[in-house]
Image: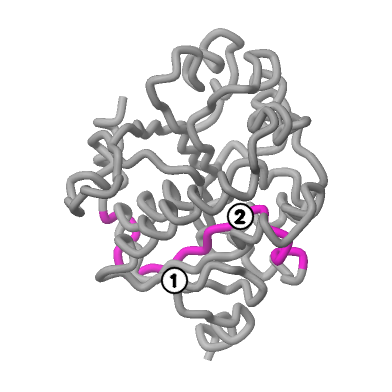
Amino acid sequence: MVAKNIELEDKHKGQRCFLLGSGPSIKQENLKVLKNEIVFALNNFYVHPDFQEIMSGDVEKYYMTAPIHLPQTEQEWKDWFEDMEQYIPKHTKILFGLNTYKNNTRYILNKYELFNNHQVNWYYTGINTGEYYSFNKKDIKMTNMIWNANTISIYALISAIYMGFDEIYLLGIDHNYVCNQGNQWRFYKEGLHQKNEISRTMKGKSYNQHTFAATGKIFKQYQMLLEKNKIYNCSNTSLLDIFEYANLEKILKKSVN
């Protein structure tokens, strides 16, 4: 399945793109201005009030989800994908993630006949980038197994780098969970697949301890991806300080001039 991704390699060389996460900082931005920009909308972003306008325009648009996992049930994932399918325009190119989880996204989509009328590519995760890992470029090549990651933004960056984008801009990728209450983690209150997610996942364990440990691993991956790539963070309230800050309005004005 991932062999098909060869069609994506360096497809956008010399271009720029914008990755759209669900962090609360994105509420401060006018995203309608991205109508004519290449964007990657991530995970549950289809619930954004301006989603349809952002995904219109005459440039390519991408939608990307991470591999699915427990504790969500098959029914919860089915409901989420069914809802998502209604909103994603047919011209959008979709990247779905897979891992070793038995009832994965492909299983759900095939069983319930979802996204049959969309353009779908798959990526496969499984490489551990733990303490003794040394970066190898083939590990972020989309025709191979790629890194395991704890956040969709890593997978989106890997995809954008593989596609050859010269400049990559992040919006709504905040990593400020420890600073906010659960209902303030994202620009929306709760996704169909995110009901009681903390209590179900942590089962009485320390959420902050888990988050700090996971964030350290994620930031290490960000640092490795930053090498030789131009990646900028456009969210000024984000805790993601690996990347240089860039103001969205100034970027867009500069491109016009």
Asked whether residue 142 is drawn in magenta, I would say no
Amino acid type indicated by mark 2: Gly
Crowding at label 1, few (<14), some or many (≥20) Cα neighbours within 10 Å? some
Q: Start and end of the magenta stretch?
A: 10-27
How many numbered discs, if any? 2
Residue for point 65% across, 26% down = 81
Q: Which mark is residue 21?
A: 2
Amino acid type indicated by mark 1: Ile
Residue for point 53% across, 38% down = 65
Residue for point 34% across, 31% down = 124
Residue for point 29% across, 45% down = 129
Q: Is residue 239 visible to the viewer in this orientation of the structure?
A: yes
Q: Quadrant of the N terminus?
A: top left
Query: Is residue 51 toward the left or the right of residue 235 in the image?
Result: right
Q: In terms of secondary structure, where does tag 2 sit?
A: loop
Query: Is residue 111 toward the left or the right of residue 95 in the image?
Result: right
**Mark 1 lies on residue:** 242
